[in-house]
Each structure stands twice: as C-alpha cells, then as structure tokens.
Image: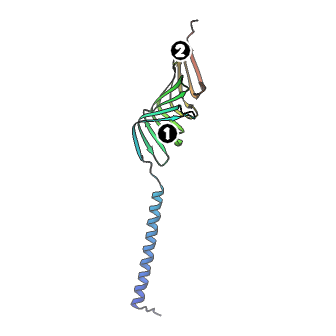
Amino acid sequence: MRLHLSKGLWAALLLVLVAALSWWLQRSVETESQSSTDQVRHEPDYYMENFVSTSLDEMGRPAYRLDADNMLHYPDNDSATLEKPHLIVFRGEEEFWDIRAESGLVLDKGESVMLQGEVVILRVTTGGAQALQIYTSDLTVRPDEKYAETAAEVTIKDGRGVTQAVGMWADLNQRRVELLSNVRGTYVPQNN
C-alpha cells in the first residue's frame, strides 16, 4: 500500500516542519541569550581619581574619612577597589586613628574596608602624646563601629617599647587592642 499525498499537502507539511524548527531554534537562542545576560560581569561602572568620602556621626561631626589615589566601583557586588587608601577614624576632637595601606577593597555597601598589603596605623593625639604605631597587613576595618582586625603579624611601637604578635582585634573608640597569639615584647624602663 502506497500513500499518495498531493503536492499541496507535501508543501504544507514541509512548511509546518520548517516553522516548528524555526520556533525551536529561536527559543534555544533566546534561552542562551537570557542565561548569558543573567550573569553580570565584574567590570567597573565608574572610577574616581583623588577620591575622598567623609562620613558624619549623628551630631554632624566627622566620624571617619576615606580617601584614595584611585577608586573603581563594581556594580555587580557594589564593591570598590582602592589604590593607596587612607582612612582616618575620628575619636572625638582630641584624637584620631590614621590608617594607610597599599591597596584596599570596600565591601558591604561601605560598612567594611579591607586594607591590603603593608598597613600602617597611627593613633594621633592633639595633646602632644607620642603616637602609638601599629604595623601589619591585610586589615579589615568597620569604620562605623570603629573596629579593626587582622590575622596577620602585628608590630606595635610606642614610647615604652615594641610588641609583636600574630592577629589583633582593635576597638578604636575605646583605645583597646587585643593581641591574639605569639605575643612577645621588648620594653624600655621609664625614667621618673
């Protein structure tokens, strides 16, 4: 038994087959295109040179200031990279913490600043007291909380001597520094 179809029926069947194939190809291209646009690239959307940002406390006084030679902002995770960041955390009008690093990363909508490479921290007072100096690397600072921490080696210098340790937590508002492990120090006797 042979099936005989007219030329018009064959043409209609061929058109339906071509339409189905076209629809399938279009859907697969749209799906692939959609999945590639869902993946946002980690590319900067803007940059600033000589970047400066000052945050005020509830009384309108400076709480902290962050500046850097260059800043690149990334929209996919709302982060920013910093070149030569300089963070000043104010403690009243008489004292502040001056923190400098080689590079940095701003995360969590500005609530956390990761300072990378060599980090130098100075506690500066206007009363003429000798500054406390802290040398470390890879320091995370939460400036609104006036808190800093690192798991790296730490060297602290002041007028009484030198202390070294591994790891540190610092409450910058209370002037409290807690060294986490391998603490050792050299102290110079004070003349009375």
Mark 1 element type: strand
Q: Which residue is mark 2?
A: 159
Q: Residue furthest top?
A: 192
Mark 2 element type: loop
Q: Residue furthest bottom?
A: 1
Residue 28 % position (x, y): 46, 67
Q: Label 1: how many residues lie within 10 Å, few (<14), some (14-19) or many (20+)?
A: many
Q: Is residue 151 above or below residue 161?
A: below
Name the residue nearer the viewer: 138 or 192.
192
User: Label 2 amino acid?
Assistant: Gly
Q: Which residue is mark 1?
A: 106
Q: How many marks?
A: 2
- Name the quadrant of the C terminus: top right
The residue at 46%/41% (across/down) is 80
User: Label 1 amino acid?
Assistant: Val
Mark earlier in primary sequence (1, 2): 1
Dividing the picture into quadrants, the one containing residue 144 is top right
Residue 66 % position (x, y): 47, 33
Residue 50 % position (x, y): 39, 35
The residue at 48%/59% (across/down) is 35
The residue at 47%/64% (across/down) is 31
Q: What numbered label is drawn on residue 114? A: none
The residue at 45%/76% (across/down) is 20
Name the residue nearer the viewer: 180 or 108.
108
Q: What distance separates the C-alpha of mark 1 from that of mark 2?
A: 33 Å
Q: Is residue 106 above or below residue 154?
A: below
Can see residue 10?
Answer: yes
> Does residue 98 appear left or right of residue 192 in this picture?
left
Residue 145 % position (x, y): 58, 34
Name the residue nearer the viewer: 21 or 123.
123
> Does residue 76 appear left or right of residue 181 in this picture?
left
